[in-house]
Image: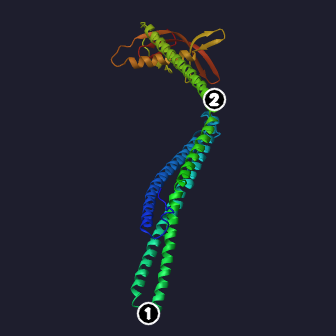
């Protein structure tokens, strides 16, 4: 370390100037180091600010997603998410504390105390000393030139000016020595304190953060158990849905097979008499020898003790399927019509104030048309 010692003193000697130049060069190198440290600290502070903003943004997004008290938020696990949101908000506070400590404890002190304080003062004192030394040298040269050629009064005034310049130069020299010594001595502990303060702020950040996140261990385990339970429930529900879909498909397949068997069992039976008018399976039209079904009439399969029994909805649906199958699989153009089913059925007729059933002979042909007659 370069300092002014007692042997050399503070006299205006070449040794003093050499020591002052060395200490000033050391101060300039220290200024460059401070500038690099300041740039790195500011970049690190900006990174902490980015993490703080990211934590706040994530916390807000988490609160909007599942932090409410509505039904959808409850289904998304708001009871557990609310605890996570609280922890992340506290964690954002720790980031803010760390940024503040780094900003005030290191960046501001390096900037103001050193770059704009001690080092700037040493630079100004060196300029002041150089100016005072130049003034003293000018006064000394002028006084030497006036010693032999000037009157006593002028010489006394020149001597007084020389003494004043010498005092100013000595005062500036002493102040420069004081500032340069302050730089050399202060840098031995000041920067170490700055770095220790920043590291201690990190220690508090991670310690508090660890304690804070440690409080989440129990909610995390509970959430994992709930998730496993809900996952198992999801598997069971999916299996139930698959079984339901499979049952519906099997029922549809059985129905299609039943329709196919019914169609295959319909063998053509030779009939007698040509129908005069036809009726489809959906409704009906009058045939020869008897009136057709009235509007709103229904076909009855048989008559029981309690009265006529109407066609059930399942049989009616089956008949409709048979009719659609016949119409889609067989074109009537250019084909010979044949009877595929015939027999007696009861038809309900409705009139004003009366409703009765009459026995009619029905014929189903290959075109899907059904005819009925008053007798066979």
Q: Measured from the top left, where is residue 122 in percent x and y?
A: 49, 65
Q: In the image, is residue 24 above or below residue 291? A: below
Of the residues under marks 1 and 2, which one precedes in the sequence? Answer: 1
Q: Residue at x 52, y 48 (%)?
A: 48
CA distance for labels 1 and 2? 105 Å
Label 2 Cα neighbours within 10 Å, binned few <14 / some 14-19 / many ≥20: few
Q: Which mark is residue 151?
A: 1
Query: 179 or 265, which lies in front?
Result: 179
Q: In the image, is residue 108 above or below residue 305? A: below
Q: Which mark is residue 254?
A: none
Disc 1 to disc 2: CB gap under 8 Å: no
Name the side, left or right, on which 155 lies relative to 236.
Answer: left
Q: Residue at x 54, y 47 (%)?
A: 52
Q: Residue at x 41, y 19 (%)?
A: 327
Name the side, left or right, on which 192 lies relative to 354.
Answer: left
Q: Residue at x 44, y 74 (%)?
A: 133
Label 1 Cα neighbours within 10 Å, binned few <14 / some 14-19 / many ≥20: few
Asked whether residue 233 appears in the rendered view, the answer is yes
Q: Measured from the top left, where is residue 298 in percent x and y?
A: 56, 19
Q: Nearer the viewer, mark 1 or mark 2?
A: 1
Give the residue number, with chain letter if any, for mark 2: 222
Coloring applied to the structure: rainbow
Name the side, left or right, on which 174 lies relative to 366.
Answer: right
Residue situated furthest right in the rendering: 306
Q: In the image, is residue 15 above or below residue 47? A: below
Q: Quadrant of residue 237?
A: top right
Q: Measured from the top left, where is residue 124 in percent x and y?
A: 48, 69
Secondary structure at numbered mark 1? loop
Q: In the image, is residue 251 above or below residue 87? A: above
Asked whether residue 277 appears in the rendered view, the answer is no
Q: Measured from the top left, where is residue 183 in percent x and y?
A: 51, 60
Q: How many marks?
A: 2
């Amino acid at each position: 370390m370069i300092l002014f010692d007692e042997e050399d003193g503070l006299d205006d000697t070449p040794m003093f100037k050499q020591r002052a130049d060395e200490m000033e060069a050391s101060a300039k190198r220290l200024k460059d180091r401070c500038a690099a440290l300041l740039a790195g600290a500011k970049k690190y502070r900006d990174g902490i600010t980015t993490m703080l903003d990211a934590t706040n943004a994530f916390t807000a997004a988490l609160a909007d997603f599942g932090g409410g008290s509505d039904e959808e938020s409850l289904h998304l696990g708001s009871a557990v998410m609310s605890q996570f949101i609280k922890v992340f908000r506290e964690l954002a506070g720790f980031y803010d504390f760390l940024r503040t400590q780094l900003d005030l404890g290191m960046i501001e002190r390096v900037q103001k105390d050193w770059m704009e304080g001690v080092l700037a003062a040493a630079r100004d004192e060196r300029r002041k000393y150089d100016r005072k030394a130049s003034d003293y040298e000018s006064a000394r040269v002028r006084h030497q030139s006036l010693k032999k050629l000037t009157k006593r009064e002028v010489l006394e005034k020149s001597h007084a000016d020389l003494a004043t310049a010498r005092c100013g130069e000595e005062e500036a020299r002493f102040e420069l020595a004081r500032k340069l010594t302050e730089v050399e001595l202060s840098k031995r502990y000041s920067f170490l304190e700055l770095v220790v303060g920043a590291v201690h702020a990190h220690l508090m950040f991670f310690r508090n953060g660890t304690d804070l996140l440690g409080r989440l261990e129990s909610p995390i385990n509970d959430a994992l158990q709930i998730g496993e339970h809900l996952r198992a429930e999801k598997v069971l529900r999916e299996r139930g849905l698959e079984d339901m879909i499979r049952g519906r498909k099997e029922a549809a397949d059985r129905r299609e097979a039943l329709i196919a068997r019914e169609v295959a069992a319909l063998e053509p039976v030779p009939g007698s008499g040509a129908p005069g008018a036809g009726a489809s399976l959906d409704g009906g039209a009058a045939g020869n020898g008897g009136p057709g079904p009235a509007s709103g009439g229904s076909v009855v399969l048989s008559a029981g003790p309690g009265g006529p029994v109407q066609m059930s909805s399942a049989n009616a649906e089956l008949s409709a399927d048979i009719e659609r199958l016949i119409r889609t699989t067989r074109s009537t153009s250019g084909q010979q019509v044949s009877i595929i089913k015939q027999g007696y059925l009861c038809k309900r007729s409705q009139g004003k104030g009366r409703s009765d059933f009459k026995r009619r002979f029905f014929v189903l042909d290959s075109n899907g048309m059904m005819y009925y007659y008053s007798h066979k």
